[in-house]
Amino acid sequence: MEHLLEVKNLKTQFGIDGTTVKAVDGVSYYVDEGEVVAFVGESGSGKSVTQYSGLQLIPSPPGKIAGGEIIYEGENLLDFGPRSEKMREIRGGKIGVIFQEPMTSLNPVMTVGNQISEAIMQHLNLKKREAKNRAIELLKTVGIPDAEHRVDYYPHQFSGGMRQRIMIAMTLSCDPKLLIADEATTALDVTTQAQILELMKDVVKRTHTSLVMVTHNLGIVARYADRVYVMYAGEIVESGPTKEIFNNPKHPYTLGLLKAVPRLDSSKDSKLVPIDGMMPDLSNKQDQCAFQPRCNHYTDHCLSSPSPQLKPVDEGQKHLYACYENINKNLFEEKLKKKSSIQEQEEESLYKTELTEEKDTILEVKNLKIYFPVKKGLMKRKIGDVKAVDDVSFKIKKGETLGLVGESGCGKTTVARSILRLYETIDGEISFKGQDIANMSKKDLRFLRKNMSMIFQDPYSSLDPRKTVESIVGEPLKNHKLVKTQKEYQKRISELLSLVGLDPTVKDRVPHEFSGGQRQRIGIARALASDPSIIVCDEAISALDVSIQAQIINLMKELQAKLGLTFLFIAHDLAAVRHISDRIAVMYLGKIVEIGDWRTLYENPQHPYTKALLNAVPIPDPLVEEERDRIIIEGEVPSLLSRPKGCPFSNRCPLASAECLDVEPALKSIETNHEVACIKV
Amino acid sequence: MTSFIIQRLLQTIVVLFLVTIMVFTVMHMVPGNPILVLLGPSATKEQIALYTAQFGLDKPVLVQYFSWVSNVLQGDFGESIIFRQDIGELIATRLPITVFVGGLAYIISVVTGMTAGVIAAVKRGGFIDSLITITANLGMATPIFWLGILGIYLFSLQLGWLPVQGFTWLTVDLSKGIKQLIMPVLLLSTVPLAMITRQTRSAMLEVIQQDYIRTGRSKGLKEKVIIIKHALRNALIPVITLLGIQLGNLVGGSVLVEQVFNIPGMGTLLVQSMLQKDFLIVQSCVLIIATVVALCNLAVDIAYGFIDPRIRYK
Amino acid sequence: METGTAKVIDKKVYTSPAAAVPPKRSSVKRFLKVFLARKVVVFSLFVLLSLVFVAIFAPLVAPYDPYYQDLTKSLQKPSMEHLLGTDMLGRDVLSRIIYGSRVSIAVGIVSVIIAGGIGMILGLIAGYFGGFIDSIIMRFMDAMMAIPMIILALFIGSALGGGLDSVMISLGIALVPSYARLTRGQVLSVKESDYVLAGTISGTSNFKNMFVHVLPNSLSPIIVLVTMNLGIAILAEAALSFLGMGINPPGAAWGAMVNEGYKYLMSQPVLSIAPGIAIIIVVLSFNIVGDALRDALDPRLRGRI
């Protein structure tokens, strides 16, 4: 059978600072009609560049396609220039792309209607009027309410999820044969992500379009893809049917990725296995296995041989891998199973002691309210409040980790910042080691600053680019006069750096010399410097690649065990939160809707929002995914200004009744360690 | 949008109010008795007393300020000592000339500058780009009074194509007027033209890298459509915000150009009265110029609001 | 509860390549590589260095005393004796241009120091305190910017009474708003960055944060602006001198020389043309170096400075 699109030995290179970066290095793949194909890999693996190369959309210079063939409908597209008539016919007309950033991918000064119709007029030769009607139809198809009006809106008048729907409408406008979704849902909230993914799946099924998904999220791959290509350092290292890849990964990188991701359904104490090191520099790539430096399975043969070629697992099979070794995951799983049966018993007993154990409360938040005034007009008259945090109460016990999860705008970061007393006025009580933070005088803040620290989300922006590692890590030491002599100072810095797994000799380096993961370690060392009782982790792992994420999660857990740290762990990744937290609070529109210990909350969620949230997270296992029910809640998180009356979730809740619009439900205890704010429970 | 306009209008009023304070303060910084400076060393005691009383300089500073401002608001700028003429009338004959010459130069620099900038950006790295960029850099580094003298030497004295100096209203003598205008207008547009070209070029280059341009390409649009419909409008937004500053450059340049070509506009009036220490005219001229610039800035900001929907629908 | 495997991994975290020392990447080297990428930049730097050299050692470099008048030799054409001829008072034009570089350099440097000093302090105060103080300062800057730079300098200069000092001060003041605006903008954006917040959480006071984290990270565009403004100040000084509001005669200043030569344009055009070319070369060099500096320090500033 002829493939819809077939790419042979594609090579794309970028000339940067006089060196050649081989971003795509001899990649071959195909896409059949009506198929959903996924490309997975971490940042820098070349998965997106591969797709853009196919459409000749890479910026040139510095990029250039150095070789290969891209065969579509019997023609090699590389025979045509990037600006040729033929290529323009293909782009948009035959192959549509949905980009990652919904906020920047639409032209801000053109109405969305015009942006959709211009493609229609270009490819389908319709008149302006007809094109606009078609645009309205398309907007309806992708679920934009009130499309007749909204067609004349500008992009900034839509939310991120809505913009992504518009992008989909745009790509669908000319009945393409193939859709490419490049990390199309990465920037979106979990529930929105689920909606958009379902929408894409429905659309391609209905129109019999093929879909190429480029993603780093293995869960999405497991849930939606028919076939998978795993990319590493510009090469495809493994490919095959999704189930095959997940059940019997043959390449150490694939296996590594699968073991590094925290799963919603994995055993809690199964340690994440990080992939050590980082992606090699693609500018001086040798003809050798690119993964070898990070591989646990390499032999001398790997060191002396050229880069391994893709070969079938069994003769005639579709499952291909590029590795000289023959690793077997099934063996590994057996080991894991044996361990986990012992572990399960241990875990069970541990869990029970955890539940009953009485630990000291180190931090207690009572009726915390953070309102920001909304001002309007010339006189800056106050017209209302943004209730970022509305009556939130919780406790954190010494040595435990409280996970705070929720989608954007739920107020989790605001909670963190008020605990750190970064706002001038705070309504409510925050008692930390018996002291009231909310009403603490400026002078007493010193106590708070010494005993509480923070790990930031972005390892790039949270370290002062002009300071050395030593002065970054040493800042709290100096501020709180924790060291007396220069010698003691140096000793403590070295100690802190080794604690987070960095060589103390890097002291005099500046941040830009380190990779993302290493920078995050520096940030952790700084957070540990003043020996604080509580560390607030604000999305501390979300900016990191999967393999690095596992390194950092493990590091944090070890440090906690070693130093008896207490964490407030804020994140939107529910699987990671489950993995690291003892107790978890779910927030929605400034309120805690459910709080409980990790097991109760994940195994027996009660609040409809928690249920939907958990259901929206795909599990990186196609077999598990097959059996899961889908609950897709409708709508998006509303703006804090248009919070619904009564229960904040009432306008999206499948259980909502008239009563819910009246009563604002309070948290009530339904079992030990489990509170829910819903009148239907 | 309305509230945006009102807000900018109020801001302009505040700025103009502050300009009056500044102008007044600077004039009071003049060392010694301003009347002495005003009248020169040959003044008699009677003259000094008369003028001191006439300008109210014997009154407290605040009173002086408010009486000056209220007079100005009524269009009464006082009388010039040198020209023996009402300053308001003097300005009324001079201002239109400067506005006319400057306006022409402004239109030329905006239109040509944006066009050249777009062409340079589209042809990035090529010969045309280098030519435009080098010319723009030279234009920013060349003193326009020097360029004017060079022009007079070449086109007037050597080739005899254009008149040396002067200004004639087009309604009085069309061909003479046009001939006299060519060099001043072109010279006056040099600096703003060079800067607008550079800004447009870099704005275009930045916009071309944006995600929405890639989206346009992924839709299969023609490159021409992408440049004109998508890139240009986005690139113009930052350029327009800087047009106000260019206007300032242009007005500053008009002082020099009017001097070189002996055009009886605000610039020559300003320089003449400064050299002759007629400070009443100086402060009136500065105030008028600041008002014109501030109002043009207001107009630019409003235009900006119309181009950028993110401001229009706020 | 820790199993054997877990312990192995445990050890691995500490010995993992994260602990490896990253290859030393010098930011100075990268900066120089981008900064000096084009030959024209190297050449411009050379021009500027020679200019400083000539200005400092003017008495040694100049062939004649620039103030020595010899009316018998007035308005001589360029010759081997007087490479650029003589002016109406018989003074050697080349020597006067060489001495004129002293005025240009002095005016450029002093006025930029004044403008940068005052502007940065105002911008820092406005950005740091915000609110009412910010509004007051920035509206005053708007008011100053409503008066075109040259006119503002002329205005202040005429109030101060002319001469070199007056030119330096008036240009210095006229350039203040650009520094205040830029510094304020930088402070506002840097203030919001995570590393400043990290400083606060580490117990650094707001005031100290300003000088430890905010100011050092706000400097790059200001350095670029300083370079660009050196050229602008020299150009403006020439304009003021041309208008007769700058350096008093018989002082040698390029702008004044253009003006003096204007009267003899028909007979001796070189009198006006030569000092003009000196201005162009110097200003162009500053602009080219400024552009390169901007690209090397912070390319995002393209089109804004």
Image: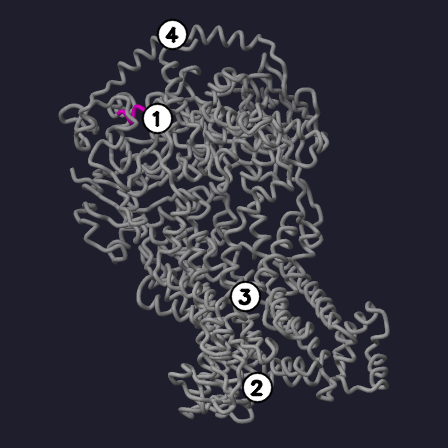
Across and down, in percent, residue A201 comes to: 36, 35
Numbered mark located on residue C108 in the image: 3
Give the residue type at disc 1: Asp
Marks 4/3: CA distance? 79 Å
Q: Is A254 contained in the magenta span? A: yes
Viewer-side label of 1, 3? 3
Left or right for B302, reference A124: right
Is there CB contact under 8 Å for labels 4 and 3?
Answer: no
* Residue span colored magenta: A252-257
Report in which chain the residue with disc 4 lies: A
Label 4: few (<14), some or many (≥20) within 10 Å?
Answer: few
Across and down, in percent, residue A80 comes to: 21, 54
Can you tell which quarter of the image residue A115 is in? bottom left
Marks 1/4: CA distance? 28 Å
Marks 2/3: CA distance? 30 Å
Label 3: few (<14), some or many (≥20) within 10 Å?
Answer: many
From the image, tell me which residue sits under label 4.
Answer: A341
Q: Is C128 contained in the magenta span? A: no
- Which element carries disc 3, helix, strand or loop? helix
From the image, tell me which residue sits under label 1.
Answer: A276
- Which element carries disc 4, helix, strand or loop? helix
In the image, A372 versus A563, the foreground residue is A563
Report in which chain the residue with disc 3 lies: C
- Which element carries disc 2, helix, strand or loop? loop
Give the residue type at disc 2: Ile
Viewer-side label of 1, 4? 1
Viewer-side label of 2, 3? 3
Marks 1/3: CA distance? 55 Å
Give the residue type at disc 3: Gly
A101 up-or-down from A612: above or below: below
Viewer-side label of 4, 3? 3
Colouring used for the render: one colour
